[in-house]
Image: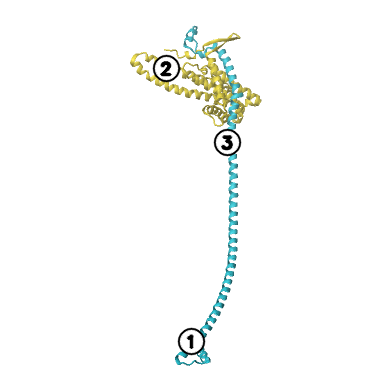
Chain colours: A yellow, B cyan
Amino acid sequence: MADPVQQFEIVKLFPVAKIGGQEIAFTNSAAFMVLAVVGITGFLLTSTARRAVVPGRMQSLAELSYEFVASTIGSTTGKEGMRFFPFVFSLFMFVLVANLVGLVPYTFTVTSHIIITVALAMSVFLTVVVYGVWKHGLHFFGLFVPKGIPIFILPLIVFIEVLSFISRPISHSVRLFANMLAGHITLKVFASFITLLGGLGAVGIASAVLPLAMVIGLTALELLVAFLQAYVFTILTCIYLNDALHPGH
Amino acid sequence: MATPTAHTEQASGPKVFPPFNSETFASQLFWLAICFIFLFVMMSKFALPRIGAIIDDRQKRISDDLAAAAKAKAASDAAVAAYEQALAEARGRAQAIANETRDKQATESQAARVQIEEDLSAKLAAAEKTIAATKQAAMANVRGIAVDATKAIVEKLIGVSPADAAVDAAVNEALKG
């Protein structure tokens, strides 16, 4: 049986540099990141190159992604949130395309590595903290002090609020990472059942239909999950950014 | 790129679950930073302003077209109103002209009729006069003929020519009767 974890292996394609004892290499992960960002940029720029008033299919898709992210920000943070639009849009497109590309057989799923999702979640977390403090000063920390709480349980509430705030990047990143990892492992396990059963003669081939049907169903589900997790990552980003914009509880 | 053969050569040491293999973190972070910053710059500098401009432009076009359509409708409404007013005025004027013409023609024809009637009655009077004169002349001739005839008849009957006075008196008597 093929190792279902093998698909997450990072393969060095060629070394680039050595920084502080850490080797920096161009890996399969890096190749798919480059593919994703070049793909996104290329698609958005070529599909809108004609700037048609009546859009074609590709331009409609580009406009759809724009308006989808814009309305997500608008509904969660209001008009002020649009200053973060390029950031949120980049996050959404990067996660979405990385998730979708990873579903193609023999590719690598960039978002199935926790270091990537942690880095993305930390960039959101730091943006929230830095922008919140820069914009609202100490008032930003009012986020941790809900109004109308009796003074004797206030320390406990503040402690819980701080803890939940700090754990945000963890849940933010683990959710995406775990979904991608689990989905791909499940797909791989069921796919390997097909080849295992297929090697057992006629009866095996007949019964291999079951895991095949399962893989087809799971692939459809994973397509949904790929989109949904990108959306969840984006909407959580918006909700966290809303705290930086409007820290009042 | 992610060839399965490359994996078997690499996994020589103690097997680590790949996502938790910290040896790969530096490379991943390095490339993530480069790729994401590249994506962010391309999105914020080129792609998003362009798409936003396309959408705004379309919105502006639509609202402009709607405004132009509303303006054109107002203009056509005004034109219709002006047309109807002009039509009503023209109709009124036509009515007035028709009435005036009818009155004028009525008076003219009335005058013409009166004139013709006058002419006709004058002619009639003249004709009547002529008839009376002719009749008188005819009657005078009739009397002469009657007198001559009477004289001749009497002469034939009795062989004597009667006196003119007697014949005249007898003819007068007969004509009266």
Callout 3: residue from which chain? B
| In the image: residue A231, left or right of residue A201 | right
Considering only order in the chain, which callout, 1 or 3, is on the residue closer to the N terminus?
A: 3
Against A31, residue B86 (above or below) is below
Q: Indicate the position of residue A139 as horizontal and vertical percent values.
A: 64, 27
Give the camera-side residue of A246 and A230: A230
Give the SS element for disc 2. helix
Against B2, residue B72 (above or below) is below
Q: Residues within 10 Å of mark 1 (few under 14, many from 20)?
A: few
Q: Amino acid at mark 2?
A: Ala
Give the SS element for disc 3. helix
Residue visible at 57% across and 36% down? B62
C-alpha span from label 2 to label 1: 162 Å
| In the image: residue A199, left or right of residue B19 | left
Q: Amino acid at mark 3?
A: Ile
Q: Which mark is residue A191?
A: 2
Q: Residues within 10 Å of mark 2 (few under 14, many from 20)?
A: many
Quarter occupied by the C terminus of chain A = top right
Give the camera-side residue of B153 and B53: B153
Q: Residues within 10 Å of mark 3 (few under 14, many from 20)?
A: few
Return the residue at label 3. B62
Total residue callouts: 3
Q: Indicate the position of residue A91 as horizontal and vertical percent values.
A: 56, 22
Q: Which mark is residue B149?
A: 1
Callout 2: residue from which chain? A
Residue visible at 60% across and 63% down? B104
C-alpha span from label 3 to label 2: 52 Å
Residue visible at 50% across and 24% down? A227
Q: Is residue A158 visible?
A: no
C-alpha span from label 3 to label 1: 122 Å
